[in-house]
Image (cartoon, rainbow, N blue to C red):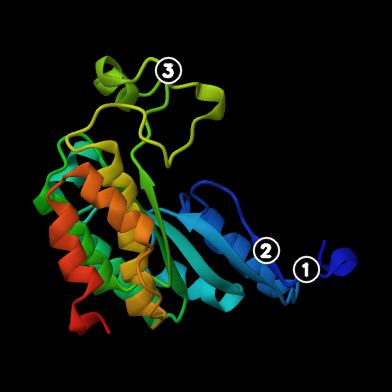
Amino acid sequence: IVSDFKPDRFRILDDVFTLEKDRTIGIAREIRRRNLSIEFECLSRIDCLDDEMLSELKASGCYRIWCGVESGSEKVLQAMRKNVSVDKIKEVARLIHKHEIEMACFFLAGYPGESREDITASLQLIDEIKPDDLSVSIAYPIPGTEFYDQVEHLVKRDVGWKHSSQYKPIYKRKYPDLYYKFLRTLILRNWDRKIRLKTAPIPVKCLNAAQEAGAWLGCQVISRFGGNRELE
């Protein structure tokens, strides 16, 4: 692939590329042994990364690692059975930054039992670990999973699985659907303004969505992220 197509970068789509430490380090060393001058990104889990592995990945050309952080709330992480704590997330984030690898994070909104305080904890964690890239999805129960079984009685009848997506609420949550659409956009806007130092205004349609939703975040977050001078 390198000799024939000469790609600038690779993306390794193994769901957990770092699951087996010896295998991952072996691949990294083989890349160096073959003098393959490539940059690549991969997917990992927080509990599958340590200082040694990150050092090997960096030396072999890894420039970005995607991690499923999901939440900044201990309560939500435990409910998801993530087997990591918020402190562990912070520790691994520090190591990734130490090795000058970009940290990209997946976060979820709308997991069963998630409260205002849990959402605030996620916002605070994003501010603290400073991901270089960020993806925010709405918790999406897939048929056949334990999560789906847990909320099956709340799933809407007209889901249309062939055309559904992780960004569309498909079951009844604690707050209105518009709340989560607004929340997702606002989290990304806040991250974008703080990390990338952009000052693009929050779209009017998002502000209208918050007003229609009537959720507590509709006023509180507009005040915090829409007109707060600390974010300028």
In three-dimensional space, the C-alpha distance between marks 2 and 1, rounded to whole angstroms, equals 7 Å
In-image side of 123 versus 14 (left or right): left
* The furthest residue to the right: 4
Q: How many marks?
A: 3
User: Which quarter of the figure is the N terminus placed in?
Assistant: bottom right
In three-dimensional space, the C-alpha distance between marks 3 and 1, rounded to whole angstroms, equals 43 Å
Q: Are marks 3 and 2 in contact (CB under 8 Å)?
A: no
Q: What secondary structure is found at the residue carrying circle 2?
A: strand
Q: What secondary structure is found at the residue carrying circle 3?
A: loop
In-image side of 7 versus 120 (left or right): right
In three-dimensional space, the C-alpha distance between marks 3 and 2, rounded to whole angstroms, equals 39 Å
Q: Position of residue 132 (x, y in %)?
A: 43, 72
Identified at 48% across, 49% down, the residue is 16
Q: Are marks 2 and 1 in contact (CB under 8 Å)?
A: yes
Amino acid type, residue under disc 2 in the picture: Phe
Amino acid type, residue under disc 3 in the picture: Asp
Q: Position of residue 114 (x, y in %)?
A: 16, 42
